[in-house]
Each structure stands twice: as structure tokens, then as C-alpha cells.
Amino acid sequence: MSFSKLGLNRSLVDALAQKGYDTPTPIQAQSIPALLEGDDLLGIAQTGTGKTAAFMLPSIQRLVAANERVKPMRCRMLILAPTRELASQIAQSAKEYGRYTKLRVATVFGGVPIARNRRDLGSGVDILVATPGRLLDLIDQKCLALSDVEILVLDEADQMLDLGFIHALKRIIPMLPKDRQSLFFSATMPKAIRDLAGQFLTDPTEVRVTPVASTAERVEQYVTFVNQKEKQALLTLFLENNEIERALIFTRTKHGADRVVKLLAGNGIEAVAIHGNKSQPQREKALGAFRSGRVKLLVATDIAARGIDVSGVSHVINFELPNVAEQYVHRIGRTARAGNDGIAFAFCAEDERPYLRGIEKLTRQKVEVVPLPDNFLTEAERIKETRVGPVPAERPDRPRKPRQDRGPRRPRKTHDAKPANAQRKRRPGGGQRRRGSKSQG
Ligand code: AMP
């Protein structure tokens, strides 16, 4: 199956080829023909399935074909997304896929000066990606009207509801022209979401891909039982002993994310954090460093990580397990994107065991247990000492230089030589494989 067989024209196929994509993913194969026909669509799919291209490609083709001139302070395609990161990524995809067209793309979301949004919208844009709150602010300030929207996309609807955007959405719907094409995506489809979809869509084509369990099947998953206060040492050891291309580390709280970054820095390991307390420039800087590969470790909370698309995430580390099992599947879905396999590790404290049971029930899979390494206690001691040594409290609060500017890393005194053992690559601290064991730190 090729993109041109689905009905996409040359300029889009060329733009896809530039990204190295020549085969449609299942959601693309199922959605693109229907969307080119102008159908409404209900997509049950999560990120990682290729859904952005699934809705963006046919929409670009239709916008170009309709050849309408956009009026000032109007947009032709409106995409609503729950988070700023997702909105930026969607806009980026729109620009890449539409590189051989003249379509104008803009984003509006909170955290950037509204004056900039007003300027961007002044002469109108073809494709607007927005979070609902900022969109309404701009409408209220009469900087934007939705009367010319030809295509509406609501992305990650379940997350929208979780974040309390329902009232904003209910205000937005009546402002849209009735004669439009509507697309609605959600990873899950409980009744509240289906009801909401019913308000947006007319006789939609329904497409369902990657049920939750199958994402989990593509990821190698491991868990180590460890006391909460020893997790930091285990993480440090894990990062020292494994070949990490890029890892996403999840914590439950914003404070926890900052703490992990600080303690890793204390052990000479550079990481950046992204969470709701960070300003927009800070988030963008952290994501940029992670994307470019300058920093290999990104510590994130669930909300901040939702929808982040970075290729080459080799490991997802659940420093803390989420209390909602589906969240675990979203987290580990950050690795294993678009068909690649990935590796996920969880550090599970005693009080998190019920969460683990919930996860195993949802995914209908047992997560393989990896015990703590034999020398864990000694190693943990060493790591603690390193931490309370010259770092980080005694360091003045100034930006850290990138690793390469700081000269080579000093060899660690107590650290064993690492055998080039493939198994080590995916076991925290290099512990032995033992199915079903329940060692506790
Ligand atoms: P999404 O589900 O839209 O977040 O996309 C997940 C990832 O898959 C992104 O990195 C896309 O760029 C990538 N992707 C989308 N379509 C394809 C394709 N047909 N082949 C390979 N990768 C793709």
C-alpha cells in the first residue's frame, strides 16, 4: 500500500518521502480515503499511531483543492488540542506535510503573549492549531472568528475532558459553521466522550486502531521492586549501566520531577524536566535539548508528556507508577512509536503494588520482574555519597554547561567495568532475570 494509492497527490507524497515515510500506518490507510471524500471521522487512536498525518494529509489536499482565500482574522481549518506541546507538534507536522503548498499555519496557546497571536491571525491563516482556552480569549477579544472554518479537528478528546475543557468546547461548537467537515480523535471512548463526539459529528466513518493492550504488547516491560527512598540510587545505577539512546523518566509530581533532575545532576548525569510549573520558554528549551539529543534524559509528569512526539526514545522509566492504569500505557507508548520496539522499566515501591496489579489487569500481561542487583546496597551507598559530596546545593545557581564543554567525565572509583552483555542493556542495575520474583529493596 502506498500513499498515492490512497489518493494523495504528488506534493504530499513528496513531502512524506522527505520524512522517510512511504507506507501508511493502519490509521492512515483507513482514514485518508474517507477524509478525502469529505466524510466526518471518529478516530479511536492514541498518539504513536500516525494519527496526525492521518488527518493532516487529506485536509491539506482538500484545503488546496478548495482554493478559498482566507479572510483577515479567520481560519479555514481549526485543530483543537489539549496541551501546548501537542499543539506545537501538530503545527510542525502541518508545516512539514504542507511544505509544497502555500498554506499558512499558526498556533495559539497560553503562555505566549496574546499580542503575538493577534499579529499572527491578523491577515488570516489556513490552518490554526489551538488550545481551547486561548482560542476563546482571542474570540472574546474579537481577534478571531470561526465563521469560515471548513475543517474542524478535535484531538485527544479524552485528555480535553480530563483537563476540564468541556465548557470551552461547548462554547466553541455553536460558533462553527454547520457546513463543515469534523474529525474527532480520542484514545478512549467512554460514554461522556461518545456524547461529545455526537455533538460534533454527522454520520462519521469510525476508525479504531491499536487498542490499549496492543501498544503494551510492542514494548518490553520490566519492573523492579524497590523502596521509594532507594529509587534514586537505582535510577542512577540503571543509567550508568545501560545504553540509553534517549529516555523519558516519569514522576507523579512536578516537585518529584525537579528532584530527580537535581539528584541526577548530583551524580554527574544531565537531565531536563518538563512539567506544568515550567514557563513556555523553559518547556520549549527542555524539549529542544531532548529532541536534538543534546540531553538524553527528559523527566516529565503525565500532563506535560502527553502527546510529546520524539523519535528514538529507547527507554521509558516509570520512576513512580501512575495510579491510573491507562496512563501507564500512554507512558510506555512514548517508546515503540510507529512500529518500533521499545523498553519500559518501572520502579515499584510497596505502596505502588496495587497500581502494578491494575496495569497487568488492563494490559492482560505480566510485567517481568527484575530483582535489584546483588551489589545494590553498596552501590546505593556510593551513589548517596557522591550526591552529598560537591553537588548540587553547594553549586551556585547558574546554568550547567553542556557535557562536552566540561571535559571528559571523571572515571568512577567504585564502578565495575561494564560487560558488553546484551541483557544488561535492559535490566536495572544489571540484575539477573527472574520471572515472578518479588524482591523488595
Ligand atoms: P502520531 O501518532 O501522529 O503522534 O505519530 C507518531 C509518529 O509516527 C510521528 O513521529 C510521526 O512522524 C510518525 N509517522 C507518521 N506516519 C508515519 C508513517 N507512515 N511511517 C512512519 N512513521 C510515521
Image (spheres, grey):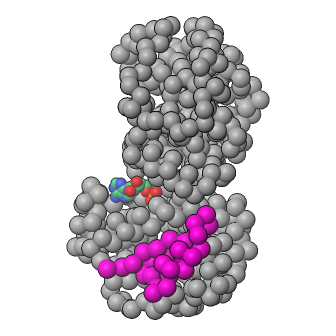
Q: Is residue 14 visible to the viewer in this orientation of the structure?
A: yes
Compared with 122, 24 (above or below) is above
User: Which corner quadrant of the image does residue 142 belong to?
Assistant: bottom right
Give the x, y percent position of residue 118: 54, 80
The answer to whether residue 106 is magenta is yes
* Residue at 75 percent of width and 25 percent of height: 350
User: Which corner quadrant of the image does residue 258 belong to?
Assistant: top right
Give the x, y percent position of residue 156: 58, 63
Compared with 133, 363 (above or below) is above
Q: Quadrant of the N terminus?
A: bottom left
Compared with 7, 265 (above or below) is above
Q: Quadrant of the C terminus?
A: top right
* Residue at 38 percent of width and 83 percent of height: 63
Q: Which residues are magenta?
A: 102-131
Give the x, y percent position of residue 27: 43, 62
Give the x, y percent position of residue 207: 49, 66
Ligand 1 located in image quadrant = bottom left
Q: Is residue 408 left or right of residue 363?
A: left
Name the residue nearer the viewer: 91 or 213: 91
Name the residue nearer the viewer: 190 or 346: 346
Q: Is residue 419 left or right of residue 252?
A: left
* Residue at 49 percent of width and 16 percent of height: 430
Name the residue nearer the viewer: 257 or 306: 257
